Image (spheres, rainbow, N blue to C red):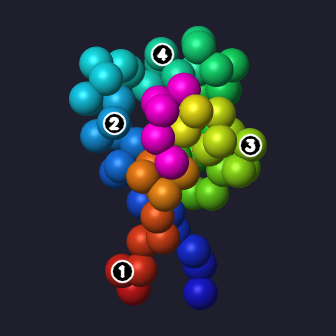
């Protein structure tokens, strides 16, 4: 079983805050490769998720969840 992650909460938060994915890479020093992984539903480190959650004033659970569609 391969775990897939759903970052739809993150994309919605970015829209609400009028931010783009590139804004995260610049503000937080996250690589474009990390953003690409998130777009593909791949795992990223908890450190990255923590930085994003802090920047967006949210909780990690609001930005990512497991995608259980199999």
Mark nearest the camera among 3 and 4 is 3
Q: Is residue 36 left or right of residue 8?
A: right
Mark 2 vs mark 4, CA separation in Å? 13 Å
Mark 2 vs mark 1, CA separation in Å? 23 Å
What residue is disc 4 on? 23
Sequence order check, earlier mark of 3 and 1: 3
Whether label 2 touches label 1, CB < 8 Å: no
What residue is disc 2 on? 13
| Residue 35 in which image quadrant | top right
Q: Quadrant of the C terminus?
A: bottom left
What's the magenta region? 55-59
Sequence order check, earlier mark of 2 and 4: 2
Residue at left 35%, top 49%?
A: 9
Whether label 2 touches label 3, CB < 8 Å: no
Mark nearest the camera among 2 and 1 is 2
Sequence order check, earlier mark of 2 and 1: 2
Q: Residues within 10 Å of mark 4 (few under 14, many from 20)?
A: few
Q: Is residue 30 left or right of residue 62?
A: right
Sequence order check, earlier mark of 4 and 1: 4
What residue is disc 1 on? 69
Residue at left 59%, top 27%?
A: 32
Q: Residues within 10 Å of mark 3 (few under 14, many from 20)?
A: few
Q: Residues within 10 Å of mark 2 (few under 14, many from 20)?
A: some
Residue at left 66%, top 26%?
A: 30
Mark 2 vs mark 3, CA separation in Å? 18 Å
> Mark 2 falls on what kind of element?
helix
In this figure, what is the number of numbered marks?
4
Res. 47 mark: 3
> Mark 1 falls on what kind of element?
loop
């Amino acid at each position: 079983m391969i775990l897939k992650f759903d970052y739809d909460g993150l994309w919605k938060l970015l829209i609400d805050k009028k931010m783009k994915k590139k804004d995260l890479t610049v503000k937080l020093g996250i690589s474009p490769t990390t953003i690409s992984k998130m777009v593909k539903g791949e795992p990223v480190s908890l450190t990255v998720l923590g930085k994003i959650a802090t920047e967006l004033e949210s909780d990690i659970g609001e930005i990512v969840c497991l995608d259980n569609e199999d």
